[in-house]
Image: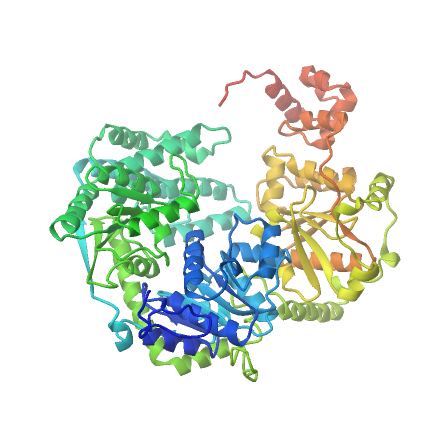
Amino acid sequence: MAATDADAIDRPLITSGVLERREYQTTLAERALGEHTLVCLPTGLGKTTVSLLVTAHRLHEVGGKSLLLAPTKPLVTQHAEFYREALEIPDDEIVVFTGEVRPDDRAALWEDSQIVIATPQVVENDLVGNRVSLADVAHCTFDECHRATGNYAYNYIAKRYHEDADTPLATGMSASPGDDEEAILQVCANLGIENVDVMTEDDADVEAYTHDTSVEWKRIELPDTVEEIRDAIEEVIKDRMTKLKELGVTRSTDPSVSEREIQKIQGKVQELMNSDDSAGYKGMSVLAEVRKLRTALTYVETQSVESFRRYMDRQREAARSSGASKADQRMVSDPNVKKAVRVAEEYTDLHPKFRRSRMLIAETLGINDGERVIVFTESRDTAETLTDFLGEHFSVKRFVGQSDTEGSDGMTQTQQQDTLERFRAGEFEVLVSTSVAEEGLDVPEVDLVLFYEPVPTAIRSIQRKGRTGRQTEGRVTVLLAEDTRDEAYFWKARQDEKKMEDELRLLKNAAGDIESRLRRQMGLDEVPDETEGSGGGQTEKVEENGGSDSDSGTGDANEQTAETNSDEDTENGQAGLEAFSGDASETEAVETDGSNASSDASETTDEETVVAEAGVDGDSDEETGLTEVVVDQRELDSTIARDLSTREGIETRLETLEVGDYVLSDRVAVERKEVEDFLETLVGGDRSMFEQVGDASRHYGRPVVIIEGENLYGRRNVHPKAIGGALASLAVDFGVSVMQTAGEEETADLLEVIATREQEEGKREVSVHGEKQSKTLAEQQEYVVASIAEVGPVTARSLLEAFGSVEDVMTAETEDLMDAEGVGKVTAERIREVVTSSYTGE
């Protein structure tokens, strides 16, 4: 926002003449300098400027560096451009961190930068991998902070920031922080925020920079053909709901079943599965059909017949693929589904929303002499079709996410940026966008925001509407297909939006009470004394369990849990995990002959593969007091690495491991399998787990398999003997220690105990051993035979020992196969079926 010198902000590190002085922005910035603050300001009124003012002050007064987090790459790039323009800091010291920047490069850039602007996932990975430190970050901004729910990366970063930074000051920014007071307070708790500072369009300082935005909705009547397609799909949904009712998991057969009801049904079906009731597996398959049919129904009702056709083409392709589920095959072969697809293929017209969109845009750009229009749609398919349709009448470009979908290429970050710049420059009139343009992007002021369909959340509705009404009166139009879920979504969003506006006003009028409640919620009876150069009354740490139910308790919470468990175990006469972390030399078992060679090999690892050392000279863990855990990059989907990285005395490091999921010493590598994945290896014919374990046993003297989750013997319809046989094979054939944990937190506890025992008491190095070795000829032969369903590695060896070669196994008759040890009639017949059946290619 360029300004004259008289109206410009003149402060240290702020480029002269760039920022217009707005009283509400400077007021919010001054308040945010005092404590960790959530800044709520309507879209388009300069939340980023508020954060920039705080950053400039902190860098000038405190020093160190600033971190600004934003949820998307285009938003990160936009913020970087603004900061480079508005701050008197060398451009090369304002750096961008996204997944496109190599991890090693990020570590070097971090050290040399004053301001880092990044996506949260990248910073999360760098913190888990111990590549960066937040110690000298004087200001951390969480843009679009309403995302700080569940297991989102903001929560972990906030926790680390409050624990690691010398003088932390956190600022959250959002136009729509939550649908109600509880949601807003939860966001604050997750980010360690103490104060909510709200300015609405009713405030005098803000009102001067806003204009009225009229919202109107246009009701669309569905044509007879679309209703015919809808009716056919609803018949199938009703039939499937009837089947679910017969299973006792629902009382409804209504085809317009809500997502809430779907969730309830899923819970009841899961209960049946957990009790090993076959009805549960049948119910889950039927429920999968219902979900897909509801998606198809949404496409035809609210999007377009073309979108419905594209979706059903993908479903038919999936049903024809190898390994297709019965639900997919059953759905596409249903007579009513076939009828709906046939009618759709014969339909040459478009959904009436297309013509109404064209009319509204023509009215805006022609009669009303407008310049720009944004059309928002939920569906990538609709965005593609709508862009082509409107392109016949206007200059139109699409704006979609970066990921490719079937039949639609995504846009690179460069393409996204170029499209927005061209839109700002007036090179085209209409931008057709999916949700990627909703949040925070500097999309220019537009004359019309057209919702192709309503969105079911207040937050997204507010984000979309914020694209108009900033400098002149704006207009928002929502298209509603009559008697469809469009209407339900619209009214829900409208109700939630009004509720959120009321909550924000309530929060604004009760700032003192909110601050008090936030402090109580975070367990802060006393506020630390203010220190010079700090952010005022800041919290020392975020509430331990401030996140969602899926968040793992870490830090002090884990220590408390460990102490409690230890006391209880002592009273019960049983020792807890901590009791087994004594001197390794006293408890180490004698290695079997089969593992001696592996152990000896691990003692002479190549120096380049050593990730960390324990108990050796200058870099010893005795000096640093840290226990090292090496984590495979692919394990970041779980919370285990994040949990470990917040624990006192534990240092995590990310690597792309060829062997194992975690490396805890030069002889211990751990493969982690969730119960469901473990059972899938027994019934799905996937033998990759045994390959992985084989690699681990060849490279490490003490390989470990952790099976994570409850109800191993009751989760699926797998015979207990099959499970026992697999466990026996892991222990006896591969020399692996098999351990079970209840969940991710317990797995993290176990990894910590083993790593500490190995490195501190055992004085062992942490090293990553070479790449996967090529299989020997014998291993390849075993793999070929074991790949047949019903045949595992033990049975494969038995067959090869009995017949001498793969060829003789494959050509043996059923009776001869049954002579081999461990081979029954079912297994023998299965082998003969695989060997003799004609290949169908399906």
Residue at figure coordinates x 50%, y 62% from the top left: 90
Q: Is residue 22 left or right of residue 712?
A: left
Residue at 60% across / 15% down in the picture? 836
- Quadrant where the N terminus sits is bottom left
- Way the structure is coloured: rainbow
* Label tally: 0
Q: Position of residue 102 (x, y in %)?
A: 58, 48
Lateral position of residue 447 relative to residue 25, left or right: left
841 up-or-down from 311: above or below: above
Identity of the residue drawn at 63% across and 22% down: 829
Between 734 and 69, the one lying in front of the other is 69
- Horizontal and vertical percent position of residue 259: 37, 51
Residue 594 visible (yes or no): yes
Figure quadrant of residue 542: bottom right
Of residues 718 and 99, the one drawn nearer to the viewer in this rendering: 99
- Across and down, in percent, residue 39 comes to 40, 71
> In the image, 707: left or right of 239?
right
Query: Residue 298 occupies which quadrant of the picture?
Result: top left
In this view of the protein, which residue sits in the foreground, 203 or 65? 65
Q: Position of residue 435 (x, y in %)?
A: 35, 51
Q: Quadrant of residue 145?
A: bottom left
Q: Depth check: 251 or 230 in front?
A: 230
Task: Reply above or below: 233 against 176.
Answer: above
Question: Which residue extends farthest left?
Answer: 367
Residue 151 is at least partly visible in this image = no
141 relative to 303, above or below: below
